Image (cartoon, grey):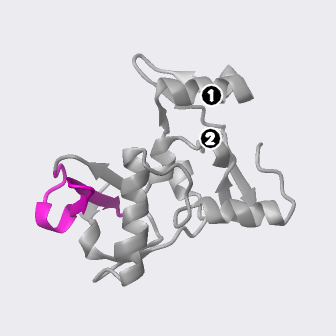
């Protein structure tokens, strides 16, 4: 994992490649774990020493990763964990990965530091576009702060296309 400040990113769009769901384990808070366990059963989760995780299937990917002709989408759209909603971005209260001036984002009187994981193929480096700066980054900040629950600019659009095709959303 290598993180870059959001001001070094021209734009971001989910390519539905599924790499995020194949490469990383999803850490759940207790409320997320409880909701998933009640809905899908405890066997879809794993307990660590001090954390809960979404179970990974035999190929190492998330148990809720769905595939339709090599377009991947999350089967947990209505209860997607915060870590998944935010990926590939990290929204922090301190500049953990350096370049604080480039990572700084002011929202509602708060100074946040937003970085992106360069493993995401949907990132395009450069000077931020207007849309990225004023809608995409704002959405990620609001998701991280709990101000927003519904995703628009993030991966949610991919799942809606799948629903329109009549595909099942849950494995």
22 on left or right of 124:
right
Q: Is 130 located above or below residue 17 in the figure?
A: below
Please rate how many residues cluster around mark 2, counting C-alpha atoms within 10 Å: few if below 14, some from 14 to 19, many from 20: some
Counting residues from the N terminus, which is met first, the one under dot 2 or under dot 1? 1
For the C terminus, the image quarter is top right
User: Residue 3: which disc?
Assistant: none
Instruction: Assess whether residue 99 is covered by the magenta stretch.
Output: yes
Please rate how many residues cluster around mark 1, counting C-alpha atoms within 10 Å: few if below 14, some from 14 to 19, many from 20: some
Under circle 2, the secondary element is helix
Which residue in the structure is indicated by mark 2?
79
Q: Quadrant of residue 141?
A: bottom left
Asked if the residues shown at circle 2 and circle 1 are in contact, with their CB atoms under 8 angstroms apart, the answer is yes
Residue at position x 71%, y 52% from top? 66
Residue at position x 26%, y 64% from top? 4
Q: List x then y, in percent, for residue 25.
A: 49, 39
Which residue in the structure is indicated by mark 1?
35
């Amino acid at each position: 994992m290598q993180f870059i400040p959001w001001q070094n990113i021209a734009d971001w769009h989910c390519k539905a490649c599924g790499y995020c769901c194949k490469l990383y384990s999803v850490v759940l808070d207790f409320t997320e774990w409880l909701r998933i366990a009640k809905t899908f059963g405890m066997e879809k989760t794993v307990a660590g020493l001090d954390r809960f995780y979404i179970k990974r299937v035999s190929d190492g990917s998330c148990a809720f990763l769905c595939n339709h002709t090599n377009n991947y989408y999350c089967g947990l759209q209505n209860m997607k964990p915060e870590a998944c909603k935010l990926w590939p971005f990290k929204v922090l209260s301190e500049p953990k990965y350096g370049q604080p001036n480039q990572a700084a984002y002011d929202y509602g009187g708060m100074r946040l530091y937003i970085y992106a994981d360069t493993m995401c193929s949907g990132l395009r480096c450069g000077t931020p576009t207007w849309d990225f700066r004023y809608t995409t980054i704002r959405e990620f900040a609001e998701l991280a702060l709990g101000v927003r629950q519904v995703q628009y600019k993030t991966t949610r659009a991919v799942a809606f296309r799948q629903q329109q095709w009549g595909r099942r959303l849950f494995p």
